[in-house]
Image: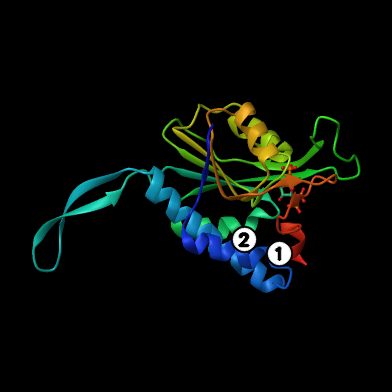
Amino acid sequence: GDAHLITHALAKDTLSRLRDVETEQVAFRKGLVKLGRICGYEIIDGAMETEFVSIETPLAETTGERVKGLNNVVIINVLRAATPFVEGLLKAFPRAKQGVISAGRNEEAGMGDDGTFPIEIDYTKLPDITAEDTVIVADPMLATGSTMCAVLDHVLADNPEPEDLFVLSAVSAPEGLTRVAEEAPQADLLTVAIDDELNDEGFIVPGLGDAGDRAFR
Ligand code: PRP
């Protein structure tokens, strides 16, 4: 349930470009793809085990090292802002199974006194999740945490507890991290940045604006 920062210099570099108001749609979308790839590599480096295997080069027999568990990865794409982010993750986990959940905040209802938004879930399609799987739930923004808590409810329902559960975001608000850590203590929370605060509309400040809007229109 702890929050861990992804500190790779290229992750910070890419996030800084995403934050910049001058970054237009195509560069923003490509930046999310790039950040997803870097985060995927960081998950592999920081959390996945390797094993020694004997291999034969064209010249000799030797010992190599392989990452374990790459065939047991499930990536959950929280529509819509996560789509380019997941495209990047798939470069690190090309054999991942994918789940899709369309979940969004009901902005008209506004943020409640408890700091949450009502979440509307329109569509879910999840692969089977097994106890051997590493599950990565990806959403570039973790603001109030309302969306992620609703998504995790779906992901964890009717499935065995996966071996590893990662909640991956680019930018998080402290409030959202706290909420998700309480609701899903078994999840490891990974983020490139923890920002200062949420404003009255529930937007992360300084943040990067509305990631879905910036990538898609
Ligand atoms: C954004 C973002 C997260 C959610 C975070 O999505 O991509 O899914 O808000 O906010 P929360 O932590 O307070 O729930 P949005 O609802 O704008 O939908 P979109 O991705 O389709 O634009």
Q: Residue furthest right?
A: 108
In this rendering, position of residue 61 left or right of residue 144:
left
Q: Is residue 171 left or right of residue 130?
A: right
The residue under label 1 is which amino acid type?
Ala
- The percent coordinates of residue 29 (x first, y second) are 65, 66
User: Where does label 1 land, which residue?
Assistant: 215
Which quadrant: the C terminus? bottom right
Q: Identify the image quadrant of the N terminus.
A: top right
Question: Spatial distance from mark 1 to mark 2, Cα to Cα?
Answer: 8 Å
Q: Which residue position holds label 2?
A: 84
Mark 1–mark 2 CB contact (< 8 Å): yes
**Residue at 68% in and 34% down:** 149
Q: Is residue 69 or residue 141 the one in the foreground?
A: 141
Q: Which of marks 1 and 2 is nearer the N terminus?
A: 2
Q: Which residue is drawn at 85% across and 46% down?
A: 201
Q: Position of residue 216 (x, y in %)?
A: 74, 64
Q: Position of residue 205 (x, y in %)?
A: 74, 52
Q: Residues within 10 Å of mark 2 (few under 14, many from 20)?
A: many
Of 157 and 182, which appears nearest the observer? 182
Furthest toward the left, the residue is 60
Q: In this view, does 168 lie above or below 209?
A: above
Q: Farthest front residue? A: 196
Q: Is mark 2 within 8 Å of ligand 1?
A: no
The relative height of residue 54 versus residue 129 in the rendered view (above or below) is below
Q: What element carries label 2?
A: helix
Q: Residue 14 vs residue 174: left or right?
A: left
Asked where in the image residue 184 lies, by quadrant, the reply is top right
Residue 82 seen by the camera: yes
Q: Callout 2, which amino acid?
A: Pro
